[in-house]
Amino acid sequence: MTIKPKFFSPGLLPSLATVIMLLILIGLGTWQWQKVGPKTALLDRIEVGMQTPALRLPLHVDNASPLEYRHVTFVGNLGAQIPARVFGLNRKGQPGYFLYAPVKRPLAMSVIVNFGWVPLGYEGPIHLPQGSVEVRGTLLRSAVPGPMTPENNAAKDIWYTADVPALATYFGLKTKEFYHFRVFADQRGEPNALPLGGQVLVNIPNNHFHYMLTWYGLAAALIGVYIAYGLKRAAKAA
């Protein structure tokens, strides 16, 4: 009896290992594919919200999430307190400080407003509106520090994160006297006048499509290696 030579013989253990790895790689690729649509929709919503006409900010805002990155407007009173300087980069990546101060709304609470950015080491005059002021800007939630961000030191007026509750406490506001979000004010006056307003950075990466291609590509490469190994092993056994 003649035994026909095998043209493909990868072996049991390599086959099992390949199946397990394929399931993992395809699962990771599918997971990234499922994130493409929602992330794209989020970025589209943010772009539309920042470009549509300003929405009159409601007096009561229990949940700021639906309003995040929306262009809003409101009227309030800005006192004469010195603004807090929060270290940060402008839209061009230049280091400096964002100027935060509370604006008290009539019959409502105070909004922590980012009135704009000034360069690092700037010693010139800072012109913020006084008294009754109409604020137009983009609503954002309280900032969250990154893993490498230094801690704020409110006692020394050193700020690296725009933590709304901490800033409100610094300005003497109690829990029910301020909204738990902030507003980035639009530019006032001349286009390059300081403080420079409208410095909203939408730093939300959308790399899921590329990750999906990477995982699926690795799965395809694994299949190619598996086939080549099986053919080569069968040829040696012939």
Image (tube, rainbow, N blue to C red):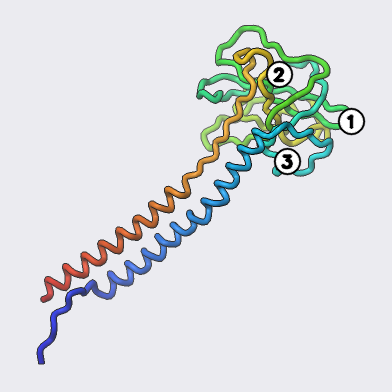
Residue 49 place in picture, x, y as percent: 66, 37
Whole-angstrom CA distance, mark 1 to mark 2, is: 23 Å
Residue under pointer 1: 107
Q: In this view, does 69 lie above or below 32?
A: above
Q: Answer with the quarter of the image where residue 183 lies.
A: top right
Marks 1,2: beta carbons within 8 A: no
Q: Which residue is drawn at 62% across and 28% down?
A: 152
Q: Which of 221 and 191 is in front in this view?
A: 191
Q: How crowded is mark 1: few (under 14 residues within 10 Å), some or many (20 or more)?
A: few
Task: Say which element carries label 1.
Answer: loop
Residue 135 place in picture, x, y as percent: 75, 24
Left or right for 116, reference 218: right
Task: Say which element carries label 2.
Answer: loop
Residue 3 place in picture, x, y as percent: 13, 86
Residue under pointer 2: 83
Mark 1 vs 2, N-terminal side? 2
Is residue 156 visible in the rendered image? The answer is no
Label 3 sits on what residue type? Answer: Ala
Whole-angstrom CA distance, mark 1 to mark 3, is: 19 Å
Numbered label attached to residue 64: 3
Left or right for 214, reference 221: right
Is residue 232 visible in the rendered image? The answer is yes
